[in-house]
Image (spheres, rainbow, N blue to C red):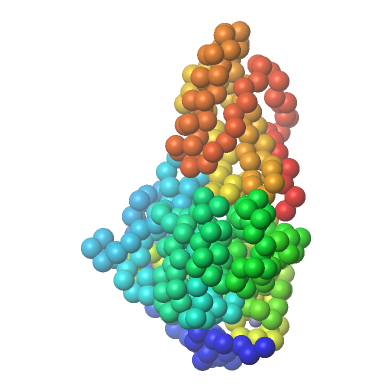
Amino acid sequence: MTVTYWEEEIETLPRVGLESIQLRRLQHLVARVYKTVKPYKRKMDEAGVRPEDIKSLADLSKLPFTVKDDLRDNYPFGLFTVPLDEVVRVHASSGTTGKPTVVGYTAKDITTWSNVMARALCCAGATKGDMIHNAYGYGLFTGGLGAHYGIERLGATAIPVSGGNSKRQITIMKDFGSTVLLSTPSYALNLADAMDSMNVDPKSLSLRVGIFGAEPWSENMREEVERKLNLKATDIYGLSEVMGPGVAQECLLTDRGMHIFEDHFLPEIIDPDTGEVLPPGEKGELVFTTLTKEAFPIIRYRTKDISRLIYDQCECGRTLVRMEKVTGRTDDMLIIRGVNVFPSQVENVLMGIDGVEPHYQIVVDREGNLDTMQVQVEVSEGVFSDEIRILENLSKYIQKEIKDLLGVTCKVKLVEPKTIQRSEGKAQRVIDNRKI
Ligand SMILES: [Zn+2]
């Protein structure tokens, strides 16, 4: 198999060369955020570290971490390093409470992002001759637009179909001759079901490769997606706080991890309990520092994703380190059909509603290929004895509030007072029955 690169020189650069680029960029970044972003300056001052202390890549560990709450505390634009008139786009994702976390991009950031995304597509074997079916959601979520600009940068044809309306998606795939599919892995399986119900044989389509991400998925799921859609399934990684899709991508010659585009995104693996940097190859929490972003750079962002870094030379010739498929999280964030959901957000919604008690449980499952979420909540004594109609209205109201605030559709089950098990220590808020 011939390997094609988007930017061969940087993708195959010996590590020593790569590390010298990383260090130069890191020093520049730290000096810039220290000067332009008060919260970064304050945290660095508190930690007793100054920009000139960054003399080697190992000195990165002297810098304080950034966590999701830092984004919330500086909502919406407090961590931007440039005036808003230089920001050409914003995106947002769910925060731990009601407010979303907001990220911004300058024109140059959009170019950088398009470029790393084009690299990712190329890494998965896509070329300018491809018809790329982009079923990631378009909107505030970085998935749709992030992938879209990369497709155009590559010179391929973008089909900006976004999510939903599966039957129409299959018709488009058939009629337009889609060759590459971008979606969440669970939505890919949903598309397979739609094909089945329309009696469309995947072998009759032109799909060759899939680039799936935005939620954790297993090797078993990979096999299922490959079999049902008759394509090669690859894994992509990205998160809005760091950039969006295009942070790392699996190549076609390994299924052991995704190449991280390290000249832009500097990875570390830390012990989530102590914050210590772990030796190469150990499993822990993935932390990223962006090296080239202008509007919203981030230093040592704790992703809460569990992974490990693989430094062995890959057969594809890329020298870029690989990150293993994400195997879990260090917090209680759930990903429901690509949407990030924190139990604390559900709790916030419930707390604002009369007639319900602060006792609830979230049951997550997978029916067919789609994630489902049911919120079981205790109602107050008085309410429970009321008529069925009142209970039905209450349940619909909760469902609507959750949909409005979290963007996820769930079922609500009202239960009698004191039926949800009380725990001695930390309440078990989530029961996740999905087999991932
Ligand atoms: Zn490779």
100, above or below 170, in the image: above
Q: Please tell me which residue lies in front, 392 or 108.
A: 392
Residue 54 visible somewhere in the drawing: no
Please, is residue 273 above or below residue 346 in the view?
below
Instruction: Report whether residue 28 is seen.
Output: yes
Residue at 44 percent across and 83 percent down: it is: 24
Residue 115 position, x and y percent, is 44, 77
Q: Is residue 325 left or right of residue 143?
A: right
Position of 393 compared to 41: left or right?
Answer: right
The x and y percentages for residue 286 are 61, 64
Q: How many marks?
A: 0
Q: Quadrant of the rendered structure where residue 306 is? A: bottom right
Q: Viewer-proximal residue, 302 or 219?
A: 219
Q: Quadrant of ligand 1?
A: bottom right
Q: Quadrant of residue 205?
A: bottom right
313 vs 396, nearest the viewer:
396
Query: With respect to residue 65, does 393 lie above or below?
Result: above
Q: Is residue 62 left or right of residue 186?
A: left
The image shows residue 197 at horizontal and vertical percentages of 65, 50
The residue lying at 55 percent from left, 78 percent from top is 126
Q: Residue at x 32, y 68 (%)?
A: 106
Question: What residue lies at 57% left-to-right and 36% top-to-bottom?
Answer: 410
Which quadrant, please, contains the N terminus? bottom right
Q: Quadrant of residue 15?
A: bottom right
Front residue of 424/305: it is 305
Vertical arrangement, residue 398 with respect to residue 14, above or below:
above
Q: Residue 113: horizontal and vertical position, in percent?
A: 43, 72
